[in-house]
Image (cartoon, rainbow, N blue to C red):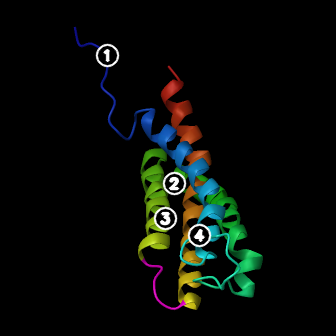
Amino acid sequence: GRGAPRLSVCTSPLVPSVSNFSIQYNYACASIAIAIMLSHNDDVVTMEEADFPEPGWAQNSLLALVFVGSVLGMLLMGYLGDLLGIHQSLVLTNTLVVFGALSCGALAWGRPAWVWRVIALGRFVLGFGIGGNYPLSAAAAAQEASP
């Protein structure tokens, strides 16, 4: 016989599962990364000046940017899933997650003011992608579960 149909990587349950894992991982890492940046030579106990002093605007808004991006991502990427299709939109939103995470790590170098701006933008993009994962991974899982 023909056997069971094979699932591609985009239609397997692996993509929504990895998407949901990345959501929780990235939410948890935000405060850890900030603690390291506010350290002096990676020692968070000393009272010396931080290697990357945090500007006032970052103290008030840096952690919130990922959540603002998440709300916008939930609204816009769910709609985009209706327009382009769930799996194409899921690939796009996961690409945003990867780009946001990599930009925070790879592009954040130089003067402290520049580092904080790059991280803020990267966290927003990351949040947007993470937010898009919520409706799209749920829709993809529901689509695969239906007979």
Q: Is residue 21 left or right of residue 68?
A: left
Q: Residues at badges 2 and 1 in contact (C-beta under 8 Å)? A: no
Mark 1 and mark 3 residues within 8 Å of each other at the beta carbon:
no
Q: Nearer the viewer, mark 2 or mark 4?
A: 4
The circle drawn on residue 4 is 1
- The answer to whether residue 129 is visible is yes
Rendering coords of residue 18 (x, y %) = 48, 42
- Pointer 3: what residue? 101
SS at mark 2 in the image: helix
In this rendering, which labeled residue sits more in front, label 1 or label 4?
Answer: 4
Foreground tag (1 vs 3) = 3
Is the residue 140 above or below the residue 47 in the image?
above
At label 3, which amino acid type do we have?
Answer: Ala
Front position among marks 2 and 1: 1
In the rendered view, does 10 fall on the left or right side of 120? left
Which residues are the magenta region?
107-111
Residue at the far right in the pictured view: 60
Residue picked out by circle 4 = 36
Between circles 3 and 2, the one closer to the viewer is: 3
Q: Earlier in the sequence, mark 3 or mark 2?
A: 2
Give the residue at x 31% y 16%.
4
Disc tally is 4
Q: Which mark is residue 83?
A: 2
Looking at the rendered image, the quarter that the N terminus falls into is: top left
Mark 2–mark 4 distance (CA, rounded to whole Å) = 41 Å
Disc 4 on helix, strand or loop? helix
Residue 97 spot, x, y in % from top left: 49, 60
In the image, what residue type sits under mark 4? Ile
Cα–Cα span, label 4 and label 3: 16 Å
Q: Is residue 99 left or right of residue 73?
A: left
Amino acid bearing label 1: Ala
